[in-house]
Amino acid sequence: MLNSVNLFIKRTCDKIAASLAVVIFSPILLILALLVRLKLGKPILFCQKRPGLNGKLFNILKFRTMTNDRDEKGKLLPDAERLPPFGQWLRSTSLDELPELINIMKGDMSFVGPRPLLVSYLDRYTPEQARRHQVKPGITGWAQVNGRNAISWEEKFKLDVWYVDHWSLWLDLKILLLTIIKVIKREGISAANHVTMSEFQGNKSSNR
């Protein structure tokens, strides 16, 4: 259950830990930024509007992992054709997520929470699925340590809502520890037949 005291502790710990992490990992951040610039070109950072707490939009920051290669008509090529080995490595190690530490410092995100998805998905959720926005989005979450991109959207949203209903500081700690294991094992990075995750098309039985 959400508790104002525990939420204050969570937000305080998030900002302190994110600030320390930026300082500690600054050499790695600089090296990765240079590698992205050399291998993928500009821009170094991927910046996109995403819905956060209560659906409020914010700009998520990640290291860019894809090229801007286009076909003869100027249309972007499929993800699989724009994701080079270096980009795959960034994703498999989750190093592309490091700039999100800035989002945590700004208060847009937390270390743990449902992943911030595309704005276009907002109108596709059922009322129950939309409850995932009752907490701040996170770099990792309950769905990420229980399948990540290897499970269906419906399963993922059920796990997100379960996290909202059962949130506690201890659960966050458990998720962080499980995340470290998942990153080391590099599990659930991609969905079947996709380099990332297929687009969420909505629910045919949705009441919206």
Image (cartoon, rainbow, N blue to C red):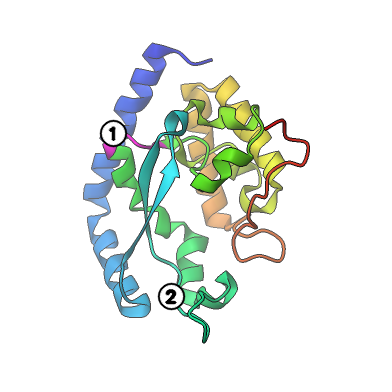
Q: Is residue 136 above or below residue 27?
A: above
Residue 111 appears left or right of 144: left
Residue 135: % across, % down: 47, 27
Q: Residue at x 59, y 43 (%)?
A: 145
- The magenta segment: 106-110
For badge 1, the amino acid type reads Lys
Picture disc at residue 68: 2
Query: For this rendering, which residue is in front, 145 or 156?
Result: 156
Quarter of the figure that contains the C terminus: top right
Q: Is residue 123 left or right of residue 60?
A: right
Q: What secondary structure predominates along the stretch shown in magenta?
A: loop
Q: Residue at x 65, y 42 (%)?
A: 146
Q: Secondary structure at mark 1?
A: helix
Magenta residue check for 137: no
Q: Position of residue 89 (x, y in %)?
A: 48, 68
Q: Which mark is residue 15?
A: 1
Q: Earlier in the sequence, mark 1 or mark 2?
A: 1
Q: Residues within 10 Å of mark 1 (few under 14, many from 20)?
A: many
The picture places residue 182, in percent across and down from the top left corner, at 57, 50
Name the amino acid, label 2.
Asn
Q: Residue at x 25, y 48 (%)?
A: 22
Query: From the viewer's perspective, is the residue at label 1 or at label 2 nearer?
Result: 2
